[in-house]
Amino acid sequence: MITKLFNKFDKKRIPELPRVLFPGRIVVVLNEAEAEKAVNYLLASDIIGIDTETRPVFRKGQHHKVALLQVATRDICFLFRLNIIGVPPCLIRLLEDKTVTKVGLSLHDDFMMLQKRVSFNKGKFIDLQDIAKDFGIEDLSLQKLYANLFHERIAKREQLSNWEAPILLDKQKNYAATDAWACIMIYERLMLLKQTNSYEIIKVAEPEPQQEVAKNEGEAPAQ
C-alpha cells in the first residue's frame, strides 16, 4: 500500500483531525537521584525522543533559560525540570551519549538553549527536519509532519504556558510528553517508508499570483 505524503500540508485541515496524546506513563523528575535512575533507564533503550520547553517571553529584552527537558521512549516519558534541578552530570552523560539514537526536531534550537545552562558535546542525535527534507517534505513543524504521516493532530495550546510553574498541570505534562514521543513515531514511520519505498509525494499546487492591481482606477490589468 502506497502512503501519500504532501510536500506542504494544509494547516486548515489540522483542526479537523483527531487529537493524538502520548499513550504511556509520564514521570516528573525533581531531584538528581531520580534523574540518575531515569537516565540509566533511557540509555538502556534502543531509541529515545527528545524536546525542550522554555517559559515564553512577552516583553522585549526578557529572557528565560530552558525549563524542561522531556525525553521519551515508546512507552514512558521523563520530564526533567531543569529550572528546579539544573543540569546534573547524569543529564550531561545522556546528552553526550553516542550509543543510543536520539531523535528530535529543530535540534539546533534545543542545543542552543541547553548550552546556555551547561556546556556539553553533542552525542548521537538525528534531526527529523533533515530526514523529512530528503523525502521532499517542505512543511517541517512537528504538528504538520505528524498530521502528514498519521492524519492526527498534535495540539499546541500549551506551548506558551508557564513551564516554570511550581507544579506542572496535567495538560502541560501531556503536551510535553506527546512532543517527545511523536519524534520517535515520525522517525520510525519515515524509516519504514524509505525502506519499503512505499510512498509518493504529492506536490501541492502553488496559488496563482494575483494580477498586478491597475495603478489608475478603471485601467485594465496588463495581459
Image (tube, rainbow, N blue to C red):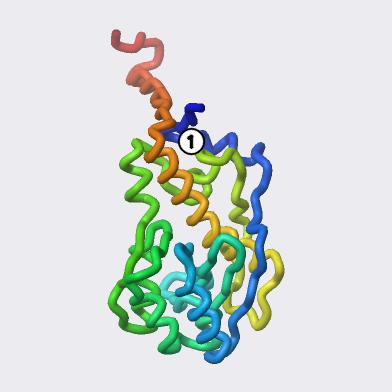
Report the amino acid beneath label 1: Phe
User: Which one is in front, 10 or 17?
Assistant: 17
Percent x, y of residue 126: 35, 59
The residue drawn where x is 46% and y is 49% is: 188
Percent x, y of residue 47: 45, 63
The residue drawn where x is 41% and y is 77% is: 94
Percent x, y of residue 41: 52, 76
User: Which one is in front, 93 or 206?
Assistant: 93
Q: In the figure, 144 relative to 40: above or below?
A: above
Q: Which residue is mark 1?
A: 9
User: Which one is in front, 145 or 193?
Assistant: 193
User: Which one is in front, 176 or 222?
Assistant: 176
Total labels: the figure holds: 1
Q: Secondary structure at mark 1?
A: loop
Q: In the figure, 169 relative to 104: above or below?
A: below
The residue drawn where x is 37% and y is 64% is: 109
Percent x, y of residue 31: 57, 89
